[in-house]
Image (tube, rainbow, N blue to C red):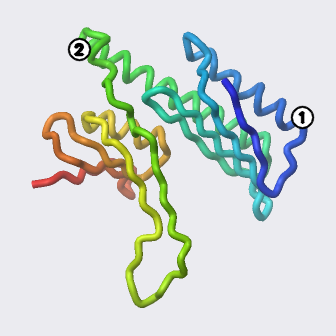
Amino acid sequence: MNLSIRGQQIEVTDALRDYVDKKLSRLEKYFDAPPTSDGTVTLSVARGIHTVEVTIPLPGLLLRAEDKSDDMYASVDAVVDKLERQIRKHKTKLNRRFRQEGSLKTLFVEEPVDGALIVDEDESLIDDDKLEVVRTKRFTLKPMDVEEAILQMDLLGHTFFVFSNIDTRDVNVVYRRNDGRYGLIAQD
């Protein structure tokens, strides 16, 4: 796995780089062949809080985790633990679906999960008197069931996820409620 390690408000020492490489190499045991995708690791410090963000794009899946603590090494350990949980959860989900549906062809959809994500940002000044869109994201919606959409949302670390419902063919949104459970927004 190729990792790009960079620091914000922190110099990435050789010892820190080696520690991150060593810890993230633990993830390779979960794959038949080591991932060939390029992952990014961002280490930052702000007001004494050490933050580690890791993003690893895989075919049909995006692994992402973030942790903040008083110690950079503890944050790295926590991020690796989160990523391991995500991988195990995803593999369990795939295995369960394989046993239920009985065919490998039903595990994978020919379309990409998110396609190429295109982000356009407008840097113009914000006028307080009018509503203005300052960021637009465009992506391809993969048909999936509600449970898979919740799994993808959790893997991305987001509070909501837009998807095409495989049962109704409508665009739906799943979201995490304040009580920790999930909600679904669907068309009538």
Give me the disc on residue 30: none
SS at badge 1: helix
Q: Is residue 5 left or right of residue 156?
A: right
Position of 182 compared to 79: left or right?
A: left
Q: Which residue is mark 1?
A: 15
Number of marks drawn: 2
Q: Quadrant of the C terminus?
A: bottom left
Q: Earlier in the sequence, mark 1 or mark 2?
A: 1
Q: Position of residue 148 (x, y in %)?
A: 32, 33
Of the pair 94 and 74, the residue shown nearer to us: 94
Circle 2 residue: 101
Q: Residue at x 46, y 64 (%)?
A: 135
Farthest residue toward the left? Answer: 188
Q: Amino acid at mark 1?
A: Ala
Crowd rating for badge 2 (residues with CA inside 10 Å; few <14, some 14–19, many 20+): few
Instruction: For marks 1 and 2, give the CA distance.
Output: 47 Å
Within the image, what quadrant is residue 179 found in? Answer: bottom left
Q: Is residue 74 above or below residue 70?
A: above
What residue appears at the point 41 percent right and 90 percent down from the top-left corner?
129
Q: Is residue 121 above or below residue 75?
A: below
Task: Judge from the rendering whether residue 68 lies leftward or rightward of residue 130; answer left or right.
Answer: right
Give 161 or 35, whichever is nearer the viewer: 35
Residue 115 is situated, as x and y percent measured from the top left of the image, at 40, 38
Q: Is residue 88 left or right of residue 141?
A: right
**Position above or below: 86 against 106:** below
Taking the view exactly as shown, the residue that stands out farthest to the bottom is 129
